Image: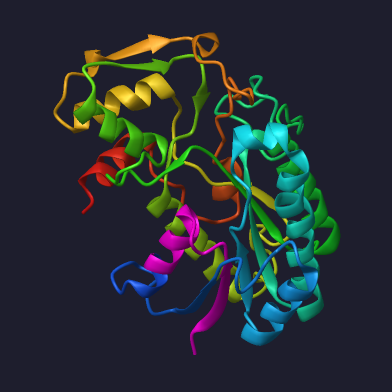
Amino acid sequence: MATRILIAGAAGQLGSALLSEWRGGTGPHAGRVDAVGVGSAEMDVTDPAAVRAAVTRFRPRIVVNCAAYTAVDAAEADEPAAHAVNAAGAGAVARACADAGCGLVHMSTDYVFSGERCAGADGCGPDDPVDPRTAYGRSKAAGERAVRSAHPAAVIVRTAWVYTGAARPGGGDFVATMRRLEAERESVDVVDDQCGSPTYVRDLARGIAELTEVLAAGPAEPGARPGPVGRTLHAAGGGAATWYEVARAVFEELGADPDRVRACRTEDMPRPAPRPRYSVLSGGSWADAGLTPLRHWRPALAAALAAP
């Protein structure tokens, strides 16, 4: 019998990719899951009664909470709106899951870190100090605390710099935007002093799918390595890059001259919310939990741009 999994925020980048992974019939996890995707109309995470009703109605084995307020700059002017979804909403989902006895995977972000270089040589680990410098980051950090308090067995997954790469009008994620601008402009200015972990959304979806399979399988055998239950894990593309390096790689993959991408500083492009200067996420915790590391960002980017 297929495992019933409820995806909150199913219309977003990751939610859509998860539905495709489980329903598409081509991925390694297709056919093993009865995936149900809901948006705010069916499960408004800011309404605890609506959350409880959805969990009661769908009776999932596991909930993957992708619902989030992600307007990083807008949150600076309306932090309560971000907290309503990312903090109070996350807590409501966690309490409903705990009361129903179902598992929870809660998605979080690199913005919970200050942006200073972390202790690990390969990036920030789950035990590095959380010290967000933005309203969005504060709301997500508060959500992590609410989830851990309400549902100690929940798995919190932080990720970073997620992109689809899809060529669609109107912009979209960073890679999609660079893809569009390559066709529209002679040159593009991109910051070269913010370093992070570019993450292809399909790779992330496959990682989350594998995680839910491990959770659905139940407790590990005695003596086995610690599994993911009750832990905070980092799932992001391998390696590290600046936005400038990612943009140059996009141009290269499109057969364009990467020198059309020009480096600039963060100060040259001021934004309402300060971006982390360094938020590379170490994949050590993910591998330690027995999960398959996500691909290095460079081949993943090539795959994203080659995807139909």
Q: Which residue sits at x=25%, y=39%?
A: 302
In this view of the protein, can residue 112 be seen by the observer?
no
Residue lying furthest left? 255
In the displayed structure, would residue 141 be above or below residue 26? above
- Report whether 196 appears left or right of 250: right
In the displayed structure, would residue 245 be above or below residue 209? above
Q: Quadrant of residue 55?
A: bottom right
Spot occupied by residue 212 in the image (x, y as percentages of width and height)? 55, 67
In the displayed structure, would residue 11 be above or below residue 217? above
In this view of the protein, can residue 135 be seen by the observer?
yes
Spot occupied by residue 247 in the image (x, y as percentages of width and height)? 33, 25
Residue 47 lies in the magenta-colored region: no
- Report whether 264 appears left or right of 39: left
Q: Which residue sits at x=50%, y=9%?
A: 268
Q: Which of 30 and 230 is in front in this view?
A: 30
The figure's colour scheme reads: rainbow
Q: Which residue sits at x=70%, y=69%?
A: 222
Q: Nearer the viewer, residue 166 or 302?
A: 166
Q: Give the range drawn in magenta.
A: 1-20
Q: Which residue sits at x=44%, y=37%?
A: 238
Residue 7 lies in the magenta-colored region: yes
Spot occupied by residue 63 in the image (x, y as percentages of width and height)? 63, 70
Spot occupied by residue 270 in the image (x, y as percentages of width and height)? 56, 16
Q: In which quarter of the image is residue 262?
A: top left
- Report whether 107 appears left or right of 250: right
Residue lying furthest right? 149
